[in-house]
Amino acid sequence: MKIIIASDHAGYELKEKIISQFQKEFEFDNYGPFSSESVDYPDYAHPVADKITKGEYEYGILICGTGNGIGMTANKHAGIRAALCWNKEIAALARQHNNANVLVLPARFIAENDAFEVVKTFFSTSFEGGRHQRRVEKIDIH
Ligand code: RB5
């Protein structure tokens, strides 16, 4: 599975750790940043969201300090369902019920091992469809 991943400075370290932890399972395209120097999360969230809505990638991971700024930005794009996940139960439900296509992590509020569990769960859980399909179709404003 090919995944596009990006962060801001607050998420930089966790991003690098996730890439190295899952390098055997997933093929990551790292959109950056490439250091922990201060950056603005929309400069990373918008391009990643664009690439997903254009079909270049099916899934992404976005990481900032709280997960809120980078997730809010991505969710401005129709077709993006970015889910802020801080434990594996939320991650499973984000896939099962919301068909989330972007996993958002709060780097400053999640332990490294919990983040790994969240990644593992998110990418091994399928959308349930059924009644959730109808709801997901109502998310975007057309
Ligand atoms: C950066 O200091 C911080 O504001 C950012 O990572 C994020 O938490 C914003 O929502």
Image: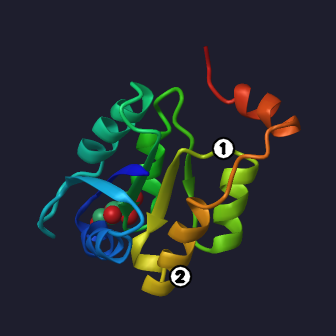
Residue 101 lies, with reference to residue 107, above or below; the image says above
Name the residue located 28 percent from the left edge and 36 percent from the top edge.
Answer: 47
Q: Nearer the viewer, residue 8 or 121?
A: 121
Q: Residues within 10 Å of mark 1 (few under 14, many from 20)?
A: many
Answer yes or no: disc 2 within 8 Å of ligand 1.
no
Residue that protrudes farthest toward the right in the picture: 131
| Amino acid type at mark 1 | Asn
Q: Secondary structure at mark 2?
A: helix
User: Which residue is labeled 1 in the image?
Assistant: 99
The image shows a total of numbered marks equal to: 2
Q: Quadrant of residue 18?
A: bottom left
Which quadrant would the C terminus be assigned to in this image? top right
Identify the image's colour scheme: rainbow, by chain, secondary structure or one colour: rainbow
> Which residue is denoted by mark 2 in the rendering?
114
In front here: 94 or 128?
128
Q: Is residue 22 above or below residue 7?
A: below
Identity, as a three-letter code, of the amino acid under mark 2: Asp
Taking the image as shown, residue 8 lies to the left or right of residue 97, namely left
